[in-house]
Amino acid sequence: MHLDAEQLALSSGKWMTAAFAAFVDGPSSEDMAVHHAGVATEHLLKAFLAGIHPSLIVDSKDFPSLVYAAGRGGLLQVRESRVKTIQLGEAYTRAQKLLKGKIPPRPDPWPLADARNGVAHAGYHDRAEVIQVFTSSIKVIDPLLVELGIGPQYWGDHKALHDELLIEGVEAARVRVEQKLARARRVFMQRYGHIDEKQRKLVVTSTVAITAPGYIEHAEPTSCPACPSTGLLAGALFLDSERHVVVLSPAIFHCSACDLRLGPEELDMLAVPLGDDVDLDVPPEDVFDGYDRDDDSDDDGESDYVDSLL
């Protein structure tokens, strides 16, 4: 069977070595660098999943592939080359559910996936996001290496560059956040700067929607860090079973008034960070079906509730 965790981990290392080699060659090779970094990340995510069971990396809608992953491919004469596996985004989603808190939430948009897919399918990537692509890849791969028992040798001769990218990536990200805030302030003034300050709040409140889109699990109204309006701090819910409290784990912030959008890592880079968990004044029984605060028989209740939401 070729859905092998060790083989996938080795493949990931080869793709990452090629990614760094292209990266150090300069701008003319950056397209290959970001593409290879994306493939390396995908293969290591799949290595982690396949290490649990090969079925975790196959397309759940393709029955022959599931039969093959179960080790019974002969029943349907499934050829290895025809097995359908999941793509980068789904691999990330599945791994994150199993590694809660160990790998960062998947941002939206996700430069790593966008760059990999853009180069693969259209020969295009955003050259301004090359460092962001690499830092995003590194921050996913590093905790996976720990889970898989793979040491820093994964980075080979590029370990020093790996370390520098993390430092430079933080600096670049902070600059990026400041750029976003400045642009958001400009947008807000372009839209509402001509209105008398006393009337502005009324106009903004009446024209700007603060209702979360359907795909967001939960969003909490929160003061915007860029403008005097209210935006939405959105993310996933989980249960603090010891305190019987519903908690929001923030992943994104969006303000419709100034178009400010911040991803999970950016929330902690604000002057007043928004990335900390938020206790919600919501009864757990209103959120989690079958919740009973007096039932202590299931020590794994919290994880069960979280899994039901993911």
Image (cartoon, grey):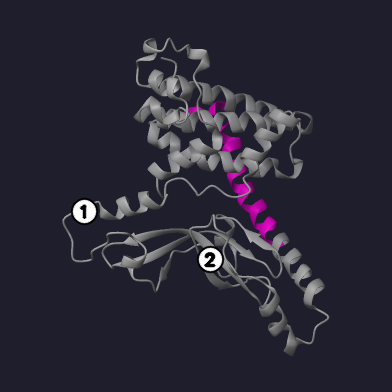
Instruction: Name the residue tied to disc 2.
Output: 274
Mark 1 against mark 2, which lies toward the viewer?
1
Vertical placement of 276 versus 167: above or below?
A: below
At 60% from the left edge and 33% from the top edge, which residue is drawn? Answer: 38
| Residue 288 figure quarter | bottom left
Residue 233: percent from the left, percent from the top?
54, 65
At 51% from the left edge and 37% from the top edge, which residue is drawn? Answer: 90
On residue 299, which mark appears?
1
Residue 284: percent from the left, percent from the top?
33, 66
Tag 1: Cα neighbours inside 10 Å, few (<14), some, or many (≥20)? few
Answer whether residue 166 is magenta in the image.
yes
Magenta-highlighted residues: 153-178
Residue 37: percent from the left, percent from the top?
61, 32
Give the mark nearer the N terminus: 1 vs 2: 2
Tag 2: Cα neighbours inside 10 Å, few (<14), some, or many (≥20)? many
Indicate the amino acid at tag 2: Leu
Judge whether residue 150 can be spotted in this image.
no
Between 108 and 26, the residue placed more toward the observer is 108
